[in-house]
Amino acid sequence: MVRCISIAFALGFGSLNALAQDLAAPPERPVPLIFDTDIGNDVDDALALGVIHALQSRGECELLAVTITKDHPLCAPFVDAVNTFYGRGDIPIGVVKEGPTPEDSKFLPLAEQRDNGELRYPHDLMSSADAPDATTVLRQALADAEDNSVVIAQVGFSTNLARLLASGPDEISDLPGKELAAKKVRLISIMAGAFEPIDGKTHREYNVVMDIPAAQALAKDWPTPIVYSGYEIGLNIPYPAASIERDYAYVDHHPLPEAYQLYMPTPHERPTWDLTSVLWAIRPERGYFDLSKPGRTQVTDEGVTEFEEAANGNCVYLIANDAQKVRTKEALAQLSSQPPD
């Protein structure tokens, strides 16, 4: 079993109670946030981006950058279109080079949708090829941040964060990637793995399986606390179809419900995998979830995420009881459909 860096050491606490209290303590506002996403594969990434913008409008976070792990020319334009829709079209966007899943998407073409010759969702980044490399964007965002302040919500593959760890000193920072992350990142909240059996079977979760070496590197080498939102969490908190059909009607065209309907139309209710990871990253103190005891994770060569309780582990995972699932579903629907400023 691979041993993770000690969470108690990283945070300066020596007991499990102190650790749990620290992770669930109210963070300083606004939370400096990096959103690392495989947007375009599933629509929950798009809804999660809407949650982030709603929470930034409430003064609870500041989106420093979006980095993308899906390798498709329309990923960056779609993110730019959503950010511009929310009035934040200047947020840096970085893209993976030679990354996983270059396949077409059901909803990314919204970035090119035109009405009467004009872009339905205006933006100025027209191709992922025009965006900088994600590693560069990550290093810049971290170098510019206060020490021990940044929260990274990783809701796609571990490709970008593994490459960050492997990066060397450059003109941005004289620190190698692992040391830069250790200095600047407070924690990462990631949607990955499965920590309960699904239908009685061990589940090989998609975000892990699509880049197993990167997931293994992250579990082994990431130097700050890791909070996992496992497959079972989002699966058991489906996004309400009624919200998609009604709550975004304050404008004629909204990118989130349109993306949702293109991906899989209502009455289907999509799991909130990525939304839960974002919600906890920004609102850990609200009681939407409980945390497991600390432990260590490793990822097998088959893509199974294994967790072993350990007092000095740096990993925990989210747990939700029935009441928390109801509260979380309502919060996510309200936040993702909140009108722009």
Image (spheres, grey):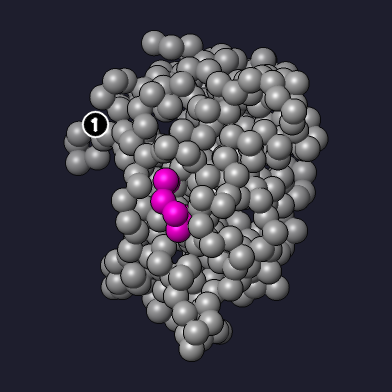
Residue 152 in view here: yes
Residue at image point 77% right, 44% down: 28
Q: Nearer the viewer, residue 156 or 125?
A: 125
Res 324 visible: no
Residue positioned 57% across, 40% down in the render: 133
Q: Is residue 45 left or right of residue 206?
A: right
| Image location of residue 162, percent across then percent down | 51, 27
Is 73 contained in the magenta span?
Answer: yes
* Left or right of residue 165: residue 42: left
| Magenta part, dominant SS | loop
Label 1: how many Cα within 10 Å (few below 14, some 14–19, many 20+): some
What residue span does the magenta drawing correspond to? 70-75
Q: Residue at x 19, y 41 (%)?
A: 199
SS at circle 1: loop
Of 71 and 46, the residue lying toward us? 71
Identify residue for label 1.
Answer: 202
Dividing the image into 4 quarters, which one contains the N terminus? Answer: top left
Which quarter shows the C terminus?
bottom right
Q: Can you tell which quarter of the image residue 141 is in?
A: top right
- Front residue of 98 and 101: 98
- Horizontally, residue 236 falls left or right of residue 61, namely left
* Residue at left offset 41%, top offset 38%: 99
Q: Residue furthest left?
A: 200
Rendered position, 40 above or below 189? below
Q: Magenta segment: does it hold 260? A: no
**Of the residues shown, which amino acid type is indicated by label 1?**
Thr
Residue 202, x across and y down, in percent:
24, 31
Find residue 270 and report its horizontal and vertical position in percent.
34, 60
